[in-house]
Amino acid sequence: MLLNNWAQQWAVPVEALEELRVLMGCNRYNTNVDRKPEEKSEVWAQQNIRLKASKVGARLWRNNVGVLFNEEGRPLRYGLANDSKALNQQIKSSDLIGILPALIRPEDAGKTIGVFTSLEVKKPGWKYTGKGREIAQLAWINLIVSLGGIAEFSTGDF
């Protein structure tokens, strides 16, 4: 059954269906597709990465990092590598975290394993400056790579 048929069967308004297509990055009217790289957003890059990753069997999830305060004023930290303010200033985990399937070589009995994958998403056209938070983001990327994972800055590719 086609999505349009399903929507019609359940009386989903056309506007709602079009909004769903935009949110999922598959709207044929999405003008972001034809834009120059410097005109595309970080949101576009993240959606593009997740679509490409899915096509090769990877799964990537958004890793929000920050701090909120509870009713008593105590900080509640969330996100990977965000145990404390001091740690978060030294190392910042990436925007997308997930698993990329990898086939083990025949001498390893042909098992498939998951490789930890971490991508720091940047707007297309972005260039590394080595300033501010980029240093802590690179520290995370280097840690993951040093332990056998996949990690990098990405402007929309996977």
Image (cartoon, rainbow, N blue to C red):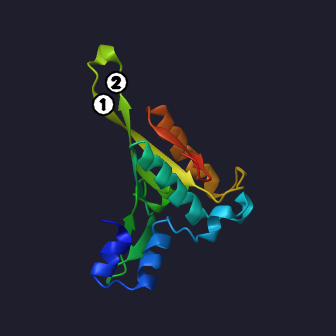
Q: Which of 36 and 87 is in front in this view?
A: 36
Q: Which badge, 1 or 2, comes first in the chain's sequence?
A: 2
Q: Which of 104 and 129 is in front in this view?
A: 104
Where, quadrant-wise, is the N terminus in this rendering? bottom left
Asked which secondary structure carries label 1, the reply is strand
In the figure, is residue 46 to the left or right of 10? right
In the image, residue 91 lies at what x, y percent? Answer: 52, 51
Residue reaching furthest to the top: 107
Residue drawn at x 30%, y 31% is: 112
Say whether marks 1 and 2 touch (CB < 8 Å).
yes
Find disc 1 in the rendering and name its residue: 112
Find disc 2 in the rendering and name its residue: 104
In the figure, is residue 157 to the left or right of 3? right
Residue drawn at x 62%, y 50% is: 135
In the image, residue 117 lies at what x, y percent? Answer: 44, 43
In the image, residue 139 lies at what x, y percent? Answer: 55, 45
In the image, residue 12 lies at what x, y percent? Answer: 34, 83
Q: Nearer the viewer, residue 63 or 81?
A: 63
Residue type at numbered disc 2: Ile
Q: In this view, does 119 lie above or below 9?
A: above
**Residue 27: which disc?**
none
Residue type at numbered disc 1: Thr
